[in-house]
């Protein structure tokens, strides 16, 4: 059985959202066979996180199995996560559809910025992304912080 290739989400793209709320995912960000399955989650910074289904599964599935059915607080938190999230599967043209609730959360109207974030994709309204980018460290500072975190000084 062939080993799955790890996809790194690099670069950024600006695309027009069509009338059905669909946006094309770059081919480099889809599986080798052209298909892709994602989970779309609202983020606290007014963007959306588009996570590969397997990453979402790794982050959530095993933890969910450990939650007691009698834990009402955890059940409420899972309901918030589940009702706020959306599964996305690319169509034959490589597009995903973004629900209106998520578009509203991110302030997206007609254009979207797809921002590679290594393990997942951030989806922004272009004007919000430009503002965020202007107030964020440059890539060399980020690499330095990553090196420090691993003790690679």
Image: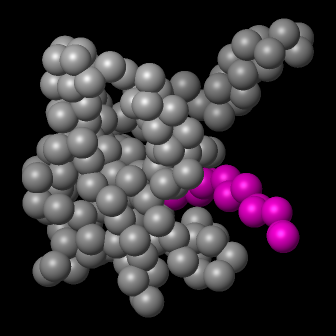
Residue 128 visible in the shown view: no
Q: Quadrant of the C terminus?
A: top right
Identify the residue at horizontal 19%, vertical 43% (top origin): 84
Give the left or right position of residue 136, taking residue 132 as reference: right
Measuring from the top left, give residue 61's x and y in whole percent.
46, 38
Compared with residue 57, is residue 70 higher up or lower down, i.e. above or below? above
Compared with residue 42, is residue 74 higher up or lower down, i.e. above or below? above
Identify the residue at horizontal 49%, vertical 54% (top origin): 53
Give the left or right position of residue 47, taking residue 12 as reference: left
Identify the residue at horizontal 11%, vertical 60% (top origin): 100
Identify the residue at horizontal 68%, vertical 58% (top origin): 7
The image quarter in which residue 6 lies: bottom right
The image quarter in which residue 34 lies: bottom right
Q: How many marks?
A: 0
**Is residue 116 located in the magenta-colored stretch of the structure?**
no
Q: Nearer the viewer, residue 39 or 153?
A: 39
The image quarter in which residue 14 lies: bottom left
The span shown in magenta is 1-12
Measuring from the top left, give residue 103's x and y in whole percent.
17, 55
Measuring from the top left, give residue 140's x and y in whole percent.
71, 29
Measuring from the top left, give residue 54's x and y in whole percent.
55, 51
Of all residues shown, which one is farthest toward the right?
Answer: 153
Q: Nearer the viewer, residue 146 or 63?
A: 63
Judged by its main secondary structure, the magenta piece is loop
Q: Nearer the viewer, residue 75 or 43?
A: 75
Give the left or right position of residue 39, taking residue 110 as reference: right
**Is residue 6 located in the magenta-colored stretch of the structure?**
yes
Q: Nearer the viewer, residue 128 or 118?
A: 118
Give the left or right position of residue 38, taking residue 140 as reference: left
């Amino acid at each position: 059985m062939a080993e799955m290739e790890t996809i790194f989400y690099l670069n950024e793209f600006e695309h027009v959202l069509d009338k059905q709320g669909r946006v094309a995912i770059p081919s480099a960000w889809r599986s080798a066979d052209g298909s892709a399955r994602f989970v779309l989650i609202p983020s606290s910074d007014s963007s959306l996180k588009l996570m590969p289904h397997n990453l979402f599964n790794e982050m959530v599935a095993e933890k969910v199995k450990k939650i007691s059915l009698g834990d009402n607080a955890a059940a409420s938190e899972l309901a918030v996560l589940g009702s706020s999230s959306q599964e996305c599967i690319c169509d034959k043209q490589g597009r995903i559809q973004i629900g209106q609730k998520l578009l509203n959360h991110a302030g997206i109207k007609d254009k979207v910025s797809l921002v590679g974030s290594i393990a997942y994709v951030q989806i922004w309204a272009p004007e919000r992304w430009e503002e965020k980018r202007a107030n964020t460290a440059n890539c060399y500072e980020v690499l330095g912080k990553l090196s420090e975190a691993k003790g690679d000084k």
